[in-house]
Structures are given as C-alpha cells and as structure tokens.
Image (tube, rainbow, N blue to C red):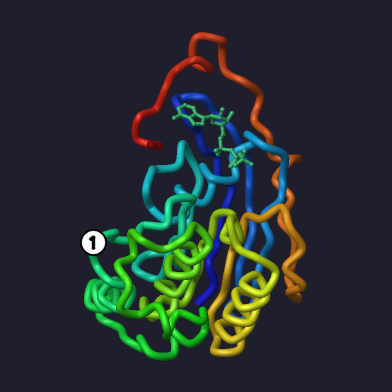
Amino acid sequence: MDLTVSDLTIARGGVPVLAGLSFVLEPGHALILRGPNGIGKTTLLRTIAGLQPPVSGQITGAQDRIAYAAHADGIKPTLSVVENLRFWARVFGAGGIQPALEAFDLTTLSERAAGSLSAGQKRRLGLARLLVTGRPIWVLDEPTVSLDTRAVAMFADAVRAHLAWGGSALIATHIDLGLEAGVLDVTPFKASLAPAAGANAFDEAFL
Ligand SMILES: Nc1ncnc2c1ncn2[C@@H]1O[C@H](COP(=O)(O)OP(=O)(O)OP(=O)(O)O)[C@@H](O)[C@H]1O
C-alpha cells in the first residue's frame, strides 16, 4: 500500500513551516528528504509518524505501518543490546533478532549494556531496531549521525534489503547514501512565516 501525502500543511510551535506538500511513496521505493536546516524536515517526519497532527491536508497508508527513527536513539540504557531488540520485537509483535544483530555487526556486543556503547554503536542498535518491528515504512531522521563509513554502508545495505522485501523508506539526510532513490526537496514548500509572536512560541512536545 502506498503512503500518500496530499496538500499537507504542518506547523511547529504554532508557526507553519511547510505548506501544500504532496507526494506518494510506493512499496519498494525510497525517498530522500532534502532541504536546508530549520525548514521543517523533522516536523514533517514527526507528522507522518503520527506524533503531531497536521494543520491541514491528508496522510493515508501510514496507520500502524511506520517504524520511526528520530534523532534520539530510543534505546534502553540498562538493557543489553539483545534485550533492547527483544523488547522492541515484543512491542511490535515481530522478531528477527539474530538477523538484526548481524545486519549491524552487533553480535559480539549483544550482551553489553546498551548504555555503555559508543555513540556509533548506539546508533547501529537504534537502526537494528527497525528490522525487528516488521513495519513496512521506515521514516528516518538523519539516520547516519555518528556512523563511520562502514556502518553507513551497512545501513544502506539494510535499506536495500528492506526495499527488496517490498518495504519503503523516507529518509532525511544530508549525505549521499548511494541508494537508488527519489529526492523530495521540501524547499519550494516553505510556508510564509506567521507573525513574529508566533515564531517565538516554544513547543515542548518536540523535546
Ligand atoms: N521546540 C520547538 N518549538 C518551536 N519551534 C521549534 C522547536 N524546535 C524547532 N523549532 C523550529 O521549527 C522549524 C522547523 O524545525 P525542524 O526541526 O522541523 O527543521 P529541520 O528541517 O528538520 O532542520 P535540521 O535540518 O536543522 O534538522 C525551525 O524553524 C525551528 O527553529
């Protein structure tokens, strides 16, 4: 099933950031989300993931089908690497823990407390989590932060395998992942700014 976004307007802190955005993401395809800092990429991904409502417009095909990886890794520091994956597999009712460990070269770290991992290792665990969700649409916000060249290649391989399985991915990134993917540049959808008072509003829900 496609993920379809129609005439979407989104806001952050009460200020519209993007307006009139429409696109379709089909199974087996990836879209790279591009645009300058602060334009609203994270806001768009959060809206598609259902963490905030749109101001207007429609999102269809997203319900219970999205695995979202935000800037934060979302890992449980006191659980081991393998316990983290078991936890997420149980939350999503899926599995495939061993392949997830292997895909991100985490097998030798599987009994380590996640809180004791390096930043790049934590990021690999956060991404391995995607594989145990069983969810078809990956929505990823700067997934390669802290990753070295080898880990970026592991991640790109995992995305390719996901697409080959019939999944899809929407990825905000500033680097070239070497994927066959479309580009969604949101720069033309920048909304005109609301009055200055609105622009200063702080939205705690984003923390
Ligand atoms: N907690 C907040 N409350 C209100 N406004 C915020 C908050 N956090 C960010 N903003 C503003 O919302 C706008 C959109 O931010 P967003 O994080 O979606 O941009 P982005 O395109 O993902 O940026 P980047 O490339 O820097 O990650 C920016 O102008 C930002 O200053």
**Along the line of sight, the residue nearer the viewer: 155 or 48:** 155
Characterize the local packing of mark 1: few (<14), some (14-19) or many (20 or more) Cα atoms within 10 angstroms.
few
**Along the line of sight, the residue nearer the viewer: 189 or 147:** 147
Residue 99 x/y as whole percent = 44, 90
Q: Quadrant of residue 150?
A: bottom right
Residue 73 x/y as whole percent = 42, 57
Vertical placement of residue 149 versus 47, above or below:
below
- Quarter containing the C terminus: top left
Going by the image, does 111 lie left or right of 103? left
Helix or strand or loop: what does disc 1 sit on? loop
Q: Residue at x 45, y 49 (%)?
A: 46
Q: Residue at x 51, y 82 (%)?
A: 105
Amino acid type at image mark 1: Thr
Q: Residue at x 70, y 69 (%)?
A: 149
Vertical placement of residue 90 versus 196, above or below:
below
Q: Which residue carries the number 1 mark?
A: 78
How many marks are shown on the rendered structure? 1
Ligand 1 image position (quadrant): top right
Residue 64 x/y as whole percent = 34, 68
Going by the image, does 202 lie left or right of 166? left
Going by the image, does 155 lie left or right of 125? right
Q: Residue at x 50, y 33 (%)?
A: 11
Vertical placement of residue 74 versus 93, above or below:
above
